[in-house]
Image (cartoon, rainbow, N blue to C red):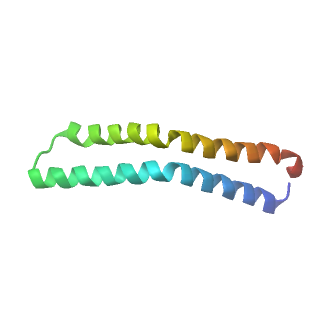
């Protein structure tokens, strides 16, 4: 395996990881910001108020986008495994 092939493989791995994790992170961040704004406006400083909506959001996003994430991960894995003979 050449250095260029290894760098390309690592680059594809990082982009696959980013594309799989990005929707979950962005949606959770938006919910966190909205909860924080709600806490500032109402002056409610309850700890569970900041965690429960984020946990529920993560579960909901994983239920909705989980099949897409798994399909993307499996397609990347198939591409890497099928490309092993070309790396030698």
The outermost residue toward the bottom is 4
Q: Is residue 87 left or right of residue 21?
A: right
Q: Give 12 or 1, whichever is nearer the viewer.
A: 12
Quadrant of the rendering where the N terminus is positioned: bottom right
Task: Give how far across and how far down residue 22 sits, in percent.
Answer: 48, 53
Task: Give how far across and how far down residue 13 sits, in percent.
Answer: 66, 52
Q: Is residue 24 left or right of residue 30?
A: right
Name the quadrant containing residue 52: top left
Depicted 56 relative to depicted 10: above or below? above
- Total residue callouts: 0
Q: Give 79 or 64, whichever is nearer the viewer.
A: 64
Q: Residue at x 74, y 60 (%)?
A: 8
Q: Is residue 12 left or right of residue 48?
A: right
Name the quadrant containing residue 2: bottom right
Q: Residue at x 61, y 52 (%)?
A: 16
Q: Residue at x 81, y 44 (%)?
A: 82
Q: Is residue 4 left or right of residue 74?
A: right
Task: Give how far across and how far down residue 45 sits, in percent.
Answer: 14, 44
Q: Residue at x 40, y 36 (%)?
A: 59
């Amino acid at each position: 395996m050449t250095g260029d092939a290894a760098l390309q493989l690592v680059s594809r791995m990082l982009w696959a990881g980013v594309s799989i994790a990005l929707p979950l992170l962005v949606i959770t961040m938006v919910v966190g910001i909205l909860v924080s704004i709600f806490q500032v406006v109402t002056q409610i400083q309850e700890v569970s108020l900041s965690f429960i909506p984020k946990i529920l959001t993560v579960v909901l996003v994983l239920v909705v986008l989980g099949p897409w994430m798994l399909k993307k991960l499996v397609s990347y894995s198939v591409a890497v495994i099928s490309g092993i003979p070309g790396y030698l």
